[in-house]
Image (cartoon, coloured by chain):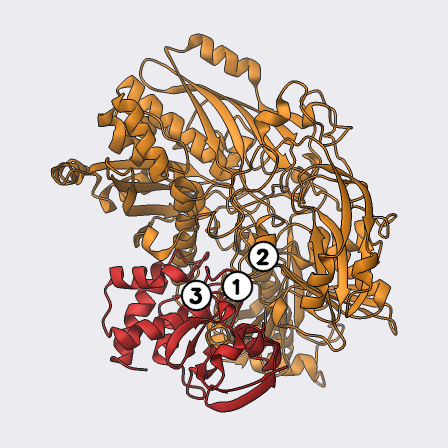
Amino acid sequence: MSANGSGIGASVKRKEDTRFLTGRGRYTDDINLPGQLYGYILRSPVAHANIGGIDTSAAAAAPGVHAIFTGTDMEGVGGIPTGWLIHSKDGEPMVEPGHPALALGKVRYVGDCVAIVVAETREQAKEAANLIDVDYQDLPAVASIEAAEAEGAAQVFDEAPGNVCYDWEVGDRAATDAAFDEATHVVSIDVVNNRLIPNAIEPRAAIANYDPATGDYTLYTTSQNPHLIRLLLGAFVLQLPEHKLRIVAPDVGGGFGSKIPHYAEEAILTWTAGQLGRPVKWTCERIDAFKSDTHGRDHISTARLALDADGKFLGLHVSTKANLGAYLSTFATCVPTYLYGILFAGPYTTPAVYCEVKSFFTNTVPVDALRGAGRPEATYLLERLVEKAAVELGIDRVEIRRKNFIREFPYQTPVALQYDQGDYDATLDLALKASDWAGFEARRAESAARGKCRGIGISTFIEACGIAPSAVVGSLGARAGLYESGSVRVHPTGSVSVFTGTHSHGQGHETTFAQIVSDMLGVDFEAVDVVHGDSAKIPFGMGTYGSRSLAVGGTAIYLAVEKVIEKGKKIAAHLLEASAEDIEFENGSFTVAGTDRSKSLGEVALTAYVPHNYPAGLEPGLEETAFYDPLNFTFPAGTHVAEVEVDPETGEVEVVSVTGADDVGRIINPMIVDGQLHGGLAHGIGQALLEECLYQDDGQLQTGSYLDYTMPRAADLPSFNINHNTTLCTHNPLGVKGVGEVGSIGVPPAVINAVIDALRPLGVNDMAMPATSQRVWQAIQQARG
Amino acid sequence: MPTVTMTVNGMERSGNVEGRTLLVEFLREHLGLTGTHVGCDTSQCGACVVHVNGTSVKSCTSLAAQADGAEVTTIEGLANGSDLHPMQEAFREHHGLQCGFCTPGMVMSAVDLANQNADPSEHEVREWLEGNLCRCTGYHNIVKAVQAGARAMGGGS
């Protein structure tokens, strides 16, 4: 590879930006099809009820209405599937109830889809929906884990006694118990991982079309993974063959996990378009997004850490209860298991780790992946517990971490993962230096002089990205592979189209992937375009989530480019009357080794498409596809330090500074990587200080608007101090790891540890997320007695 | 239905609208100017910010009829041909956008700030942007972009 001004490692300005900055982005709601009708989804206003009947007569007679469909109309159409089968401790498969796209006989959460009204205009559809008379026969609801597991609790599904979906475990329980028997110290903690609402700024939307001339369906949808939607919608719900179903996810305005799942609305829209033979468009209003976009987190955990007299970790025991919501969303079941329990070694050598997770159905919005997905929950618990151990044992909180760091790689953890590479001391040292950790006490004193309580908190963490390999995840219950495809088409005059099965919804793939291809092929950055988001253009793809795009999708592109170069060498060898083994490729030229005889990539490409003088037996054309199935997860790691100042009179927490020292593997575009870190940090600080989804006991969503759910705004956050120390991933050719979720994984415990550090002199030793001013003020009042 | 007439991005545009038609609906649905986005319906997120008579306004909570006779500028009207407006250029230069959905509202809001304050401090920018939500950037680079854009504008658009 040759470095150039727009190649690997350069902060190239993004290809995407001009269209976004000039209002020429093309998001789903920007698309209108000739003859389109508008759909409005009528949602359940109650959390749990039998549907005694639905009277649609008045609505059907309303102006502009074309059709109304309810659950009975879609009866016989397949239900919404889930993507991961978990087995319980006893070997039994999880309880997997049906999920009808439109509620059939019963509604199970506020927001459940009850009917679709299709009309000439959006307003007509919405007004007609108000005329539908649904006989809701209220049932008692369970809106929390505590309610779901209570004796005599209402049942969300008859087939799930006690509302339990599964009771899963990972790790060696006996070995962990033995570690506790030998321990000098045992430190315990109870934590809640607060439920969050993702809130991508673009609301979900979809337009479905059916072409009776060809029998083809097209669905434009706000998705992070269009091929996955095609697979689930086509094969499981509508039983449409893939070649008759095209899914397009055009520009998508943020996802954060909430645009992974296959949603009921996608099935309802597509089926309705088929029934009516006309395009049907639906755009979610924000108030409906709060109660229908999948939510995230929502765990209750208790954990114990066993330590020897010297502060070495001997064993970790974690018991978690997870809320899955009313139905099993696409990745719902794997988030609190295979993206959570296997993280509990963290960066530490703890020899025995055991984690058990019991998951529950509740009458709440389905819970699925949200930025970090399982890994923030694990990291928060572990880093709170390690911090507490340091305080209780009187060990310096940096030293207790350093004392337990893994330093030899590869490292096999007791919870399935094998870390390939890392340098946790390096990121810790970097973070301490960059945050001026040593100078903190002077800053604390300065704050105290102003009547403020200052605290500093730290978190040292690993994450696991690019979930893989397919054979392993398949054995653990995944119902899909987790490889990625990449195709590289060199056009006859040497420009390049790259097709990726990943999907960019803010990550800048059109730029990053173009940098890789431009660098490898020695063509101008401007001559490379990246195509994504359309199942009719891309061979196949698993989409973007779990920080997988570069490590998995980028590697697929890398391998496709290598194939292009290999084929190009054969063509060049023919033109240069040399052996292909003697051809070297560098800076866009194929050269006979040791000579100045060469052919440019453009000349080779033209020859490939105009093969008048061409190697015998070689296919014309210069286009290659690679499918890459990773050998392992990648393991980004780092240290985050947060410094806060608390006003003890109001409980208000100000984040004074956040310092990240991150190892995300090789960096292709530093500007984009830092931007990903900033966004993740903001999301993590939001969880720590501001965001919390709350339900009433009867299942009514209390935080159902931007007035009630606190999103981080510009004035809530500081500028971020980002630093890098890089070790390369050993099992992909680019050495890349992943960066999209780092901030939301690493920073929440650093912030809460800082808040507790600030308040400890006042006698406050625990703090729940979000540490709102009200919660902090109450804790101070309680401590003061 | 009443007719509204307004100058949008320098061109006179008219349309028949219902009394309840929102300015953002008029721009998006009637005029096809889809650069202005709807991220909420409650005036909270700011994705819909446009300029009406030179001042930033949330077009999801303004009626089209209220803009009758007004000068309206949307994100599509900011650049001079293929030359980006200095604020747009600053967002590009400083990576002040990721998914792009909040971007039109952010840029239009920022231009209004810059028209009033040629050299806003970080604190002033963060306070000004209280009506604009972004979930991607953590605001870090947006703040840098707004400061740079304001300086590049030199006190006027």
Marks 3 and 2: which is nearer the front?
3
Whether residue B86 can be seen here:
yes
Q: Amino acid at mark 2?
A: Gly
Whether residue A577 can be seen here:
no
The reply to whether callout 2 and callout 1 are in contact (CB within 8 Å) is yes
Q: Amino acid at mark 1?
A: His
Q: Nearer the viewer, residue A624 or A294?
A: A294
The residue at which mark 1 appears reads as A509
Spatial CA span between label 1 and label 3:
14 Å
Instruction: Please provide percent x and percent y for residue A345.
Output: 47, 29
- A476 w.r.t. A703: above or below: above
In this rendering, position of residue A711 left or right of residue A211? left
> What color was chain A assigned in the picture?
orange
Q: Which mark is residue A553?
A: 2
* Residues at discs 1 and 3 both on one chain: no
Looking at the image, which residue is at 72% across and 76% down? A620
Q: Nearer the viewer, residue A740 or A233?
A: A233
Tell me which corner region of the image, top left, top right, bottom left or bottom right, holds residue A328: top right
Label tally? 3
The residue at which mark 3 appears reads as B97
